[in-house]
Amino acid sequence: MQSLTFTPGRAFLSADSTQPPWTVVFEDEGVAAYFYACDRTSTTHEDSILDAMLIYNVGALEKSDRENERPTSERIAAVEWSKDGLRAALYLDGIPQALYDFGTRAGYCRMDFPNFMEEQGDNWRKSTHAWSEDAMRRFEAELYGLAAQE
């Protein structure tokens, strides 16, 4: 597991799969934070991004922290890859926020954003990023050697 302690508004965490060429990136550039699925064989940064999912809006997160009287704005982001290197989960403060499945070419996140109409030739599902407790449960069950609860 790779992790990063950060303050919302600026963060970068990149984690490579054991199965090249897959990489995931968590990035907070100040306004919002996204989780990216990437292919390291692409020659340009733009072409390497297969999919992107919104994780949070910095302003909304700061407002929530104030309302809940959170004692610190510091957070912990962590990325965990599956044993087969085809799935990666993003956790914020120990809570799963997003999951990429490179095998099925699908992403799941709690924000379910952004979504696009399917286009001919797309090889990654982008019409929905709806959160899937089942997909996360299977991921963690495999990771920790537990039987998935149906």
Image (cartoon, rainbow, N blue to C red):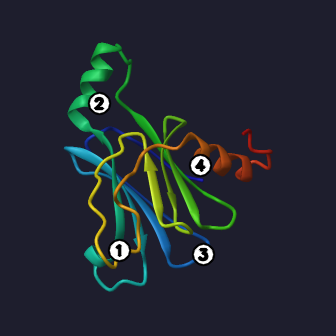
> Which secondary structure lies at badge 2?
helix
- Which residue position holds label 3? 19
| Label 4 or label 1, whichever comes before in sequence order | 1
Q: Amino acid at mark 2?
A: Leu
| Image x and y of residue 72, in percent | 37, 24
The disc at residue 75 is none
51 or 58, which lies in front?
51
- Which residue position holds label 1? 122
Q: Amino acid at mark 1?
A: Asp
Residue 15 vertical position relative to residue 134 in the rendered view, above or below: below
- Mark 1 or 3: in front is 1
- Mark 3 or 4: in front is 4
| Image x and y of residue 24, in percent | 45, 62
- Which residue position holds label 4? 135
- Binning the other alpha carbons within 10 Å of mark 4 as few (below 14), some (14 to 19) or many (20 upward) gives some
| Label 3 or label 2, whichever comes before in sequence order | 3
- Which residue position holds label 2? 61
| Label 2 or label 1, whichever comes before in sequence order | 2
89 or 92, which lies in front?
89
